[in-house]
């Protein structure tokens, strides 16, 4: 350490008293229910280290580190400047102080930029920088205990940050040297318990059969394993990477009364989801379940790819980083089929935001903090990548308090067939993008384990902050590289890092990899850590030697790092070196095909009530109609998403036709989004929508699955999609499959996926599953999530002008209810808001006629005679009609069917129904096209801004639109005075 | 001969292709150049009649939106930029590009190194990023991009640091008197937004959405007119057609072609 070297601290303070960011933190404190805090002042800290003097650093601070119009900056040498401590003593007389800094090794993009920028300013000699935050907290109850509570609950997350109640000592990342240290894992001669202990000690999540398979391999090879080999096997064989549960052999017990299931499945996935795609056999599906993303035909010249991933466990322990790297990961899946990412989706399941701090299980973050962190993480990544985030869903349930669900989706576009698959021996294995650290170590196995109170600490390394700009660089480089034909194969570094990416890429051929060449973030990584690291923003491609130079040129142009880490061989073995020491040498046959098939028992449960089993009207409770409607509109699962949607850029790339919010005031809830990609030269557009309903899942996983598939498809149809050209993705988030009931729920859902896909002729093109979404609290109690299936739909239309929105357009228009209207209360939101007056009955039955109904409706869409369309979902007809009124700021008069109890008609939930606006001039054509299809005239659009319902000529209730908006937005309405 | 636009591309720039499409539709040729290659190749800028700094998150907004791209403009490219300004060629900075031009001391007027800026773009009053459509009214007749635009202009904003803030209110007055306020946020009917959220989406003083330099050839604005050039981009076609963003680019290209 050079003794001329000094460390400086620059403190940047807002000039204004009411600084938005500081106020934001104060609001968060109150939202968390922490009392006694009156004021928070937030400063930025920049730590500068180097052989420089105070004047130089002050100049850097003045010109670069602050905005003189809004902020002031103070610079001092750490531990020597009395004056600086004056400021602190001054403040701490009235305020408590908390300093927060990133842990060493956590990505800090700003720090690197400071060093680069200083040189541009002609300030040389700075060799390191890092950043932090300083909080001054004022208030009655601000004790040290309170400060620590604030730090731990809000300001700092131990997973990536450290805090101090005095000036914090900065840490800097040092030049990186790896160590070649490799240990031998003894496998031969171990007893069953010994094998399981080894698996447990290394958090490998391998069961006895799998450990025994590894043991016999070792006996064949006549040696034990290196830690690199053991870790690669654990990762390659992890649930996350090979989906053992879905590939398992399943024995089925207790078949339910109303349906029969096979007595056994030889291979659950092949016999359900993949079988559906095979049997639908759609010629516009170009690739399904083969690559990182499913691919469909778009306009003759281009193909669309779509993938949805979950990032649940990381988001539970570090919400921002977890969601950040979740969206980053799924975007790389799309880059991994050589496509340009053009749209993102996010579906989020959280615990209720009103949960009391004291009611949280040990080691669990508050749902409000998880939600804000996750949303900020998606915002940060999607916006900075320049990809519009256009579709999503949000669901609150106590079952998600300890185990939130974060589904991230990405859509890409590429010229037809441009993704190469021609890897040959001799190709160079090229690593592109970010540096490698301990990030996400064992993430693949971690995500396959049940969480416990220690997970946060033990698996801390499993989460990190993403660097979207680095990932964007990968797109900037790889799209031209694809068009120039510079690579033979491509795959992304996700869970399992190089081990998974390179392992997959050379699984047919074999290859020799040199770990010593991999660029590192910081020193001390051992070979298995480099091989397994899940550092983000990295892609691996196989490049013919003659193309490497041209690729290097592209990388220089876009400031992307390129490293040659080895070559493709023809040995059929995966060999990894550290300098000249061989640290891994595995037979691909065993590595990729040696995993023994798992065996599970599934117990099919009988639902309490069968689908469509409803009580007589006379048994329905007396209800206050308008109050019930307003309560439903303000329910967190139904209320306006505008505050979230607005923080996502949904316009970048200029293709968004139907926005997430629509209507005259641009706040109506769209059923899906429609995008006309800039790359497509024709008029074709695609639709994104989704279906999700854990409330149904609790009652009956089979019917839930049919209903959410119907909802995803219905939402796409409601946006104008062609029902014969919709592809879907499955994302299962389930509990522990070794529990026969949990497995039974999975079998029911998977079988329903097959049955429904074939009936609707809607193929699955991709999917992902996440198991062990359960949590063992200190109390020893098991917190499981409801069986949750997300169906994401990718629809298509020949002409964007066909696109529909849900807002009422024109006074005097006619309203029709299209579909088999059979509302039921089982799993309904009516039951959720009236627990005491629950109507105990079955889920709505998913009508068999729905596909036929959608086809007929589509024939009216292509005629351009539909003014508005909205689907009936949570909250039923009442909520759907109210939302259409709000979207168009126009009233409606709904005549309730005389043959159904008004409560049931308004708030019961049904499958397959659309509420449609048609102009009187188009009435006859509409009805002729809908002949023989269930479709009833149900009302008119009114000039008067009021939603009213009548039954047999008598008014049931009427509510003004401003009142609807207040309830639905949980606020007073803005801009209404214009 | 078609006028040629140089579109600067920094790591994190993301509306480069959106603005290229708008300029092409307005009749210009466009070249998108990464700053790194521009710098190393010592590319000649004099063959270009227009300079465009597009939207995005250059350098991930590290140290504040546009700050590091501004540093590139004042260090690597200061000569080329000065030549552009001296020749009074059309220059436009949109969103992140606007932020960069302000922090580089090019807007609202040329600032000497070390001189304290009198205006900046800071965090939205709401303290968060916001994407929504707004209505803009063209005010400045001096600004070659907005002169003669009679129609209102609808387009999205998508930013977290678009709050135009000044050191002292006198300066706002000066900008108005000097006809440097190019675009203001307004109600759909063209009346002033009067700072009312969300019509004025970020709390900018005087509803200022865009300003030009004293010469009128350099325009910076937060909203994205390049994202309203096709009918399919218009959110509520049924009730509010037209009000496209294209005329602004047509203005700039026409001016450039007369150079």
Image (cartoon, rainbow, N blue to C red):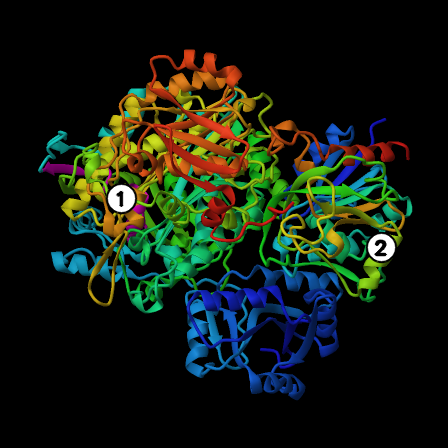
Q: Is residue A260 above or below residue B189?
A: above
Q: Which residue is mark 1?
A: A622
Q: Residues within 10 Å of mark 2 (few under 14, many from 20)?
A: some
Q: Is residue A823 above or below residue A180?
A: above
Of A600 and A204, which appears nearest the observer? A600
The answer to whether residue B222 is visible is yes
Please state the extent of the stretch shown in magenta in the rendering: A229-253
- Asked whether A246 falls inside the magenta stretch, the response is yes
The answer to whether residue B40 is visible is no
Q: Quadrant of the N terminus of chain A?
A: bottom right
Q: In the image, residue A447 lies at what x, y percent? A: 32, 52
The residue sitting at 31% across, 33% down in the picture is: A905
The residue sitting at 27% across, 35% down in the picture is: A705
Label 1, secondary structure: give it: loop
**Side (left or right) of B53 relative to A787:** right
Q: Which residue is mark 2?
A: B175
Q: In the image, residue A91 lies at what x, y percent? A: 60, 83
The quadrant holding residue A443 is bottom left
| Residue lying furthest left | A254
Could you tell me how many numbered marks the image carries? 2
The residue sitting at 24% across, 43% down in the picture is: A621
The residue sitting at 16% across, 33% down in the picture is: A265
Q: Quadrant of the C terminus of chain A?
A: top right
- Asked whether A807 falls inside the magenta stretch, the response is no
């Amino acid at each position: 350490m050079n003794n001329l070297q000094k460390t400086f601290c620059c403190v940047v303070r807002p000039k204004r008293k009411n600084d938005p960011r500081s106020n934001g933190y104060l609001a968060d404190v109150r939202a968390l229910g922490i009392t006694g805090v009156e004021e928070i002042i937030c400063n930025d800290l920049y730590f500068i280290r180097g052989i420089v003097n105070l004047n130089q650093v002050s100049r850097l601070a003045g010109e670069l580190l602050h905005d003189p119009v809004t902020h002031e900056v103070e610079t001092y040498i750490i531990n020597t400047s009395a004056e600086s401590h004056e400021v602190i003593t001054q403040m701490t007389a009235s305020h408590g102080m908390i300093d927060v800094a990133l842990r060493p090794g956590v990505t800090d993009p700003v720090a690197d930029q400071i060093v680069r920028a200083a040189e541009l300013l002609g300030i040389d000699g700075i060799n390191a920088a890092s950043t932090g935050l300083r909080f001054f907290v004022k208030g009655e109850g601000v004790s040290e205990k309170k400060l620590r509570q604030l730090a731990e609950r809000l300001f700092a997350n131990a997973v990536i940050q450290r805090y101090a109640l005095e000036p914090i000592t900065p840490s800097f990342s040092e030049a990186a040297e790896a160590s070649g240290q490799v240990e031998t894992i003894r496998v031969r001669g171990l007893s069953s318990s010994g094998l399981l202990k080894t698996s447990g000690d290394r958090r490998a999540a391998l069961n006895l059969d799998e450990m025994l398979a590894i043991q016999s391999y070792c006996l064949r090879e006549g040696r034990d394993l290196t830690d690199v080999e053991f870790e690669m096997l654990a990762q390659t064989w992890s649930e996350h990477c090979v989906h053992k549960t879905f590939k398992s052999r399943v024995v089925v017990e207790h078949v339910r009364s109303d349906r029969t299931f096979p007595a056994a499945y030889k291979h659950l996935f092949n016999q359900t989801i993949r079988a559906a795609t095979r049997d639908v056999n759609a010629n516009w599906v170009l690739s399904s379940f083969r690559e990182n993303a499913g691919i469909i035909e778009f306009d003759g010249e281009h193909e669309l790819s779509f993938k949805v991933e979950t990032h649940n466990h990381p988001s539970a322990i570090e919400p921002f980083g977890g969601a950040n790297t979740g969206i980053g990961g799924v975007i790389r899946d799309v880059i991994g089929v050589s496509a340009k990412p053009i749209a993102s989706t996010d579906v989020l399941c959280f615990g209720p935001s009103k949960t009391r701090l004291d009611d949280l299980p040990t080691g669990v973050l508050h749902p409000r903090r998880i939600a804000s962190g996750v949303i900020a993480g998606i915002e940060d990544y999607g916006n900075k990548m320049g990809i519009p985030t256009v579709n999503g869903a949000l669901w609150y349930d106590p079952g998600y308090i300890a185990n939130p669900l974060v589904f991230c989706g990405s859509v890409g576009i590429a010229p037809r067939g441009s993704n190469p698959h021609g890897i040959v021996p001799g190709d160079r294995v090229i690593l592109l993008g970010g540096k490698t650290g301990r990030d996400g170590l064992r993430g693949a196995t971690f995500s396959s384990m049940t969480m416990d109170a220690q997970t946060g600490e033990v698996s801390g390394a499993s989460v990190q902050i993403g660097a979207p700009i680095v990932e964007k660089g990968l797109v900037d480089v790889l799209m031209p590289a694809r068009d120039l034909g510079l690579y033979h194969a491509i795959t992304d570094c996700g869970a399992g890092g190089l081990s998974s990416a390179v392992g997959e890429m050379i699984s047919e051929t074999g290859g020799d990899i040199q770990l010593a060449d991999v660029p590192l973030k910081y020193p001390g990584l051992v070979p298995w850590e480099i091989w397994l690291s899940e550092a983000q923003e990295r892609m691996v491609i196989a490049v013919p030697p003659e193309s490497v130079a041209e690729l290097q040129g592209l990388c220089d142009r876009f400031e992307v790092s390129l490293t040659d880490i080895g070559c493709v061989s023809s040995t059929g073995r995966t060999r990894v070196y550290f300098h000249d020491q061989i640290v891994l040498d595995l037979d691909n046959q065993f590595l990729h095909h040696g995993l023994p098939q798992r065996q599970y028992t599934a117990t099919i449960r009988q639902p309490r009530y069968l689908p469509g089993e409803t009580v007589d009207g006379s048994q329905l409770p007396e209800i206050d109609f308008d109050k019930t409607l307003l309560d439903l509109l303000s329910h967190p699962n139904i209320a306006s998403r505008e505050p979230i949607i607005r923080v996502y850029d949904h316009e970048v790339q200029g293709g968004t036709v139907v926005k997430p919010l629509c209507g005259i005031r641009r706040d109506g809830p769209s059923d899906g989004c429609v995008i006309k990609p800039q790359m497509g030269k024709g008029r074709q557009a695609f639709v994104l929508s989704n279906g999700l309903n854990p409330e149904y899942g609790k009652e009956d996983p089979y019917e839930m699955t049919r209903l959410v598939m119907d909802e995803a498809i219905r939402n796409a149809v409601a946006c104008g999609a062609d029902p014969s050209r919709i592809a879907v993705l499955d994302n299962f988030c389930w509990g522990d499959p070794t529990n026969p009931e949990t497995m039974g729920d999975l079998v029911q859902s998977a079988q329903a996926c097959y049955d429904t896909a074939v009936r609707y002729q809607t193929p699955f093109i991709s999917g992902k599953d996440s198991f062990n979404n359960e949590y063992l609290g200190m109390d020893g109690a098991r917190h499981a999530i409801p069986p949750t299936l997300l169906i994401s739909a990718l629809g298509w239309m020949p002409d964007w002008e066909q696109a529909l929105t849900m807002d009422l357009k024109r006074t005097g228009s006619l309203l029709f209810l299209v579909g088999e209207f059979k509302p039921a209360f089982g799993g309904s939101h009516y039951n959720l808001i009236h627990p005491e007056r629950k109507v105990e009955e079955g889920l709505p039955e998913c009508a068999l006629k729905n596909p036929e109904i959608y086809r007929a409706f589509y024939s009216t869409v292509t005629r351009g005679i539909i003014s508005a369309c909205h689907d009936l979902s949570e909250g039923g007809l009442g909520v759907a009609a109210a939302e259409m009124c709000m979207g168009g700021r126009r009233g409606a008069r709904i005549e309730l069917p005389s043959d159904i109890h008004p409560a049931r008609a308004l708030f019961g939930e049904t499958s397959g129904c659309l509420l449609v606006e048609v102009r009187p001039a188009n009435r006859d054509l509409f009805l002729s096209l809908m002949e023989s299809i269930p479709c009833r005239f149900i009302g008119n659009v009114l000039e008067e801004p009021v939603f009213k319902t009548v039954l047999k000529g008598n008014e049931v209730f009427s509510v003004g639109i401003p009142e609807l908006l207040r309830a639905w937005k949980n606020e007073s309405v803005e801009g209404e005075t214009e | 001969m078609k006028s040629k636009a140089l579109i600067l591309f920094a790591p994190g720039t993301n509306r480069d292709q959106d603005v290229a499409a708008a300029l092409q539709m307005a009749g210009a040729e466009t070249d998108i150049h990464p700053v790194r290659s521009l710098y190393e190749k010592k590319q000649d800028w004099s063959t270009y009649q227009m300079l465009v700094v597009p939207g995005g998150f250059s350098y991930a907004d590290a140290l504040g939106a546009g700050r590091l791209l501004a540093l590139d403009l004042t260090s690597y490219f200061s000569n080329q930029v000065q030549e552009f300004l001296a020749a009074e060629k059309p220059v436009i900075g949109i969103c992140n590009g606007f932020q960069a031009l302000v922090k580089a001391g090019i807007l609202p007027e040329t600032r000497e190194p070390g001189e304290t800026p009198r205006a900046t773009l800071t965090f939205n009053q709401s303290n968060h990023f916001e994407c929504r459509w707004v209505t803009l009214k063209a005010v400045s007749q001096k600004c070659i991009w907005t002169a003669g635009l009679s129609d209102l202009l609808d387009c999205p904003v998508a930013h977290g640091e678009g709050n135009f803030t000044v050191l002292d209110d006198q300066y706002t007055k000066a900008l108005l008197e000097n006809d440097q306020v190019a675009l203001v946020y307004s109600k759909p009917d063209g009346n002033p937004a009067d700072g009312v959220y969300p019509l004025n989406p970020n709390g900018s003083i005087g509803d200022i959405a865009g300003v030009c330099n004293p010469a009128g050839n350099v325009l910076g604005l937060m909203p994205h007119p390049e994202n309203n050039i096709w009918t399919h981009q218009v959110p509520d076609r049924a009730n509010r057609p037209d009000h496209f963003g294209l005329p602004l680019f047509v203005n700039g290209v026409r001016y450039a072609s007369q150079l």
